[in-house]
Image (cartoon, coloured by chain):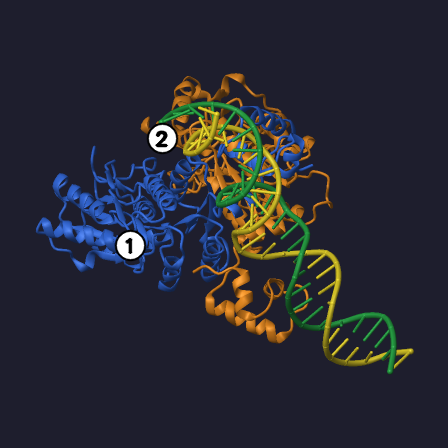
Chain colours: A orange, B blue, C green, D yellow
Amino acid sequence: MKLTISQIAKLAGVSKSTVSRALNGSGYVSEGTKRKIQEIIRKYDYVPDSKAVNLSKKRTFTVGLVLPSTSGPFYGEVIRGVEEVLSARKYFTLLTVLDSGQDEKQARKRYLSMIREKRVDGAIVFDPTVDEGTVRKLSESKIPIVFLLKDFQTFGIDSVMVDNFTGSVLMVDHLVEKHGYKSIAFVRGPMVSDDSEQRFQGFVESLRRHNLCCDNLLVFTSDFTFEGGRKAFQELRKELNRLEAIFCANDEMALGIIEEMKREGIQIGQDIAVVGFDDAFWSGHIEPPLTTVHQPMYEVGKISAQRVLERSNNPDVFKDPVKITLQTQLVVRKSCGCGC
Amino acid sequence: MKLTISQIAKLAGVSKSTVSRALNGSGYVSEGTKRKIQEIIRKYDYVPDSKAVNLSKKRTFTVGLVLPSTSGPFYGEVIRGVEEVLSARKYFTLLTVLDSGQDEKQARKRYLSMIREKRVDGAIVFDPTVDEGTVRKLSESKIPIVFLLKDFQTFGIDSVMVDNFTGSVLMVDHLVEKHGYKSIAFVRGPMVSDDSEQRFQGFVESLRRHNLCCDNLLVFTSDFTFEGGRKAFQELRKELNRLEAIFCANDEMALGIIEEMKREGIQIGQDIAVVGFDDAFWSGHIEPPLTTVHQPMYEVGKISAQRVLERSNNPDVFKDPVKITLQTQLVVRKSCGCGC
DNA sequence: CTCAGGTATGAAACCGGTTCCATATATTCG
DNA sequence: CGAATATATGGAACCGGTTTCATACCTGAG
């Protein structure tokens, strides 16, 4: 039988209010009654119903987390970061995944509902292809929102970003300065991807700084998938003899290319370098281990969650939207030619 | 300004009850007033507060999902399966991850709270090292619970299992029948792991059926990690010359072993077969592509979610706990020697 | 001794919805 | 045409807590 606070009160011979105060440690309750109440609570294994608590406290102690998908390397890391912070503060995570239903529009509606129905006290939204209408609606909600990897400061929304540009620069610096490569191809992700664009810009910038030009013939567009990498290789091959390195905008495409090259007997790292971006968890375990750029998604999760809680608990302070950018890290392994 | 149902009612010149009925399509409301109400709702962009709805309906339209971790291949698949079902029925997912805080005990308390505070209408629990006390508490909760990959039918809890045993049998059948291997080593996971045990039993059973004996010298114990695989190889090497195949209880250890072998110039698939279990998403992309056993974790997620909803909406029917076992699938690639 | 302030408690309002029940009007059927 | 039934609506109770406010006692200071 599920007890309510009134029944507990009756059993303890006191009023609801006193039980509530004893439970929350708020207001005055004598030691004696506190003990008596606690005993009864233990005896009947009473736990307050969160639905009632939420309503009267006008809070849910829950943070929404919206992710594009759950496959792939990062998403798990983001969740881990978020959960670490939330669990420590006794909050819960309400998860919504965009690729689990049929259509994107529907998925967006779903997370907007979650927010507008006030199921959560704040939300962390990772939606790379979000539309402006949705962002506007998000910004109209009264709860704190942190957007991941997209900058909506102008909409009054906090964002946590990853510095793709600098990561890319670091990678190309390494290829040029350490290995002396001059002829480097770049394999982009889909044109709509900001990440892909920023990584490409970093590539261009580093070349420029080294007085190398970016040969348009050596820039290929693909789609961030393994299969896309294989296809990109087919286009690449006609330029192959003049190439020293291939920089892929993510690890998955790099893997596709590496596989095709192996099939042709090309020695990766020696004949030609292939490097990626993301540092997927398998990147170090393929042959040869992939040189890549690590994205601190765990930290992204942690910082976003901290930010949401901070804002949620100080509604008025820190009113201005903030943009936090985390640094990426070059991970040198063998596929760039190091240690060959 | 956030409106309440009472304000809407006032604006429409009707009572709360009428607005509520119009909103839910329950009871009688004339077309005229319905339209009027809907117009006002649209105009002021009113959305009912879920906290109040939950309290009066005594439900949250939320299902708890407890996962051991979020790294690794399966967990994302489970989430996807669960989300697919829940999103279609307009439910939400409240996620708890066990490895995100410091200590396991704390993490268990957290998900027990989630359930006992009635934050969720049902829960899907994946906790491979759960203790009996926790299971008992789960079974005492009045909400439907589905346990993943552990059988607690005797506690009155539904479970969704994966047939590790048969998967293992299929694998060994393949190694023996297709390739004629007779001397096969097995690398176990940690002794506490049920999965490891079942996979081992399948290995033993298939050998027995083929009138081969299981040589204890060829059974090694490791810990399901990449590093553990490498270490296992060091122990293995003294038996190496008489080995034809190595069956690892998961892909990660197989990868560790493969890496060590490559370093020694051993040709995997030709000199010796190495196979795994899990079908991690990278398993097909390593060199050589890994022969392994696929676990249908997406389906596990889907079925558990369906089961929870079904029970939640028919509280009394189907009272008996159910155990559903899903089949695994042999994925033949190259590391077993096929296509060499 | 009296009064202010700290301590302890209960009654009642409140959070924002849903739902039961009573009432009133419209419609249908015998 | 009257009774039964369907339709439409509002009032009030309810979900299970929290919080405000009033009351009462107790203590110590003046």
Regarding residue B106, the answer to whether it shows in the image is yes
Q: Residue at point 41% right, 17% down?
A: A238
Outermost left residue: B211
**Labels 2 and 1 touching (C-beta < 8 A):** no
Q: Residue B239 placed where, x, y %?
A: 21, 55
Quarter of the image for the C terminus of chain B: give it. Answer: top left
Q: In the image shown, does C13 or B267 lie closer to the viewer?
A: C13
What's the chain of the residue with tag 1? B
Mark 2 vs mark 1: tell me if same chain: no
Q: Residue at point 53% right, 58% down?
A: A48
| Tag 1 secondary structure | loop
Regarding residue A296, the answer to whether it shows in the image is no
Residue hosting label 2: A259
- Foreground mark, 2 or 1, reads 1
Left or right, A93 with reference to A156: left
Label 2 crowd bin: few (<14), some (14–19), many (20+), radius 10 Å: many
Q: Residue at point 61% right, 51% down?
A: A56
Q: Residue B88 placed where, x, y %?
A: 42, 34
Q: In the image shown, does A277 or B19 lie closer to the viewer?
A: B19
Left or right, A254 with reference to A12: left
**Compared to B130, does A36 lie above or below?**
below
Q: Residue B308 placed where, x, y %?
A: 37, 45
What's the chain of the residue with tag 2? A
Report the amino acid beneath label 1. Asp
Q: What number is the disc on residue B151?
A: 1
Q: Residue at point 64% right, 36% down?
A: A141
| Tag 2 secondary structure | helix
Quarter of the image for the N terminus of chain B: give it. Answer: top right
Report the amino acid beneath label 2. Glu
State the CA–CA distance, disc 2 to disc 1.
Answer: 41 Å
Q: Which of the 4 image quadrants contains residue B76?
A: top left
Label 1 crowd bin: few (<14), some (14–19), many (20+), radius 10 Å: some
